[in-house]
Image (cartoon, rainbow, N blue to C red):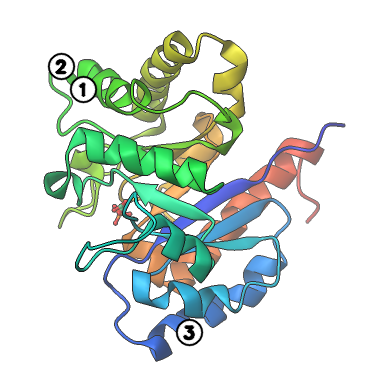
């Protein structure tokens, strides 16, 4: 039986951890549980200044560390920036790019340059795309966001590319408004079709990983597990809530076990 690839949880801590002590205790509170998971891996994305500290604890393949952004040059006169090389040297293997909370700070070509630089440094870009609204142009918005990146990025190593579909209307609002599995699947179809056109092979698209992000939690994850083809999830709000994360891990583990072996033994 072919082993299924593990589901990924990308934990985007955003700016919600404000001291070394908190970064350490948050990571340590989930580390042991994560190292025992069979079907799930986690990438922790702390604020830049805690990446190195969290990375020092990485001693199991089930968890990794990522950055929330990175500047696409190695070094130089760039006040306030953190370079891709610094991220890598600090221990990050992944970098979130094009997040909707950053898109107003950067141009489309900035995002593409960052993706290129991350790939050149043998790290994995987690490229966020998503429409603002499900209006009549939402599909065009998605395809344009993909073109803005991949018309400028060398089309190699698709296995190192992660696309996170994060509809802006679903992210971190005051009122939770997650997409449904059906809405995610509609978007995935658009995304894969466009990527296939650009990469010119279905194999390249099969090699990439596709995630969902937007108000995901322990209450709505099952809809995605049961009804969507998804390689994992990007979470914000619940990324620093160990209790909710643990429940999500358990739901993923049970679901994946069932997929492989049928009903769970009681
Ligand atoms: C995000 O900001 O990428 C995100 C998914 O946030 P939340 O889970 O809080 O909607």
The picture places residue 118, in percent across and down from the top left corner, at: 45, 46
Q: What is the x, y in percent for residue 134?
A: 18, 25
Left or right relative to 69: residue 160: right
Circles 3, 2 touching at the beta carbon (< 8 Å): no
Secondary structure type for disc 3? helix
Mark 1 touching mark 3, by CB under 8 A? Answer: no
Tag 2–tag 1 contact (CB < 8 Å): yes
Can you tell which mark lies on residue 223? none
Task: Measure the alpha-carbon separation of dots 1 and 3.
Answer: 39 Å
Element at badge 1?
Answer: helix
Considering every residue shown, the one lying at the far bottom of the view is: 21
Question: 137 left or right of 164?
Answer: left
Give the CA separation, mark 3 to mark 2. 43 Å
Q: Measuring 39% from the left and 14% from the top, which residue is drawn there?
A: 194
**Disc with the residue nearer the chain's start (1 vs 3):** 3
Q: Which residue is mark 3?
A: 24
Query: Image quarter for residue 153?
Result: top left
Observer-nearest of 241 and 125: 125
């Amino acid at each position: 039986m072919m082993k299924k690839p593990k589901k990924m949880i990308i934990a985007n801590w955003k700016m919600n951890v404000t001291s070394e002590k908190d970064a350490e205790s948050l990571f340590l509170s989930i580390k042991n549980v994560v190292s025992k998971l069979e079907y799930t891996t986690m990438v922790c994305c702390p604020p830049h200044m805690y990446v190195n500290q969290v990375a020092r604890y990485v001693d199991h393949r089930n968890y990794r560390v990522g950055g929330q952004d990175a500047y696409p040059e190695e070094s130089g006169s760039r006040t306030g920036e953190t370079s891709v090389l610094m991220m890598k040297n600090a221990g990050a293997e992944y970098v979130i790019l094009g997040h909707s909370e950053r898109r107003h700070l950067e141009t489309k070509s900035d995002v593409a340059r960052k993706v290129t630089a991350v790939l050149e440094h043998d790290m994995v870009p987690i490229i966020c795309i998503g429409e603002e609204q499900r209006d009549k142009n939402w599909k065009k918005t998605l395809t344009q966001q993909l073109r803005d990146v991949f018309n400028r990025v060398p089309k190699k190593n698709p296995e190192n590319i992660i696309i996170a579909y994060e509809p802006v209307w679903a992210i971190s609002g005051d009122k939770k408004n997650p997409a449904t599995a059906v809405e995610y699947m509609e978007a995935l179809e658009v995304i894969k079709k466009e990527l296939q056109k650009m990469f010119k092979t279905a194999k390249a698209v099969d090699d990439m990983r596709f995630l969902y992000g937007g108000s995901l939690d322990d209450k709505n994850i099952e809809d995605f597990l049961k009804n969507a083809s998804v390689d994992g999830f990007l979470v914000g709000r619940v990324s620093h809530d160990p209790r909710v994360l643990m429940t999500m891990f358990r739901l993923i583990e049970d679901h994946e076990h069932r997929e492989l072996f049928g009903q769970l033994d009681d």
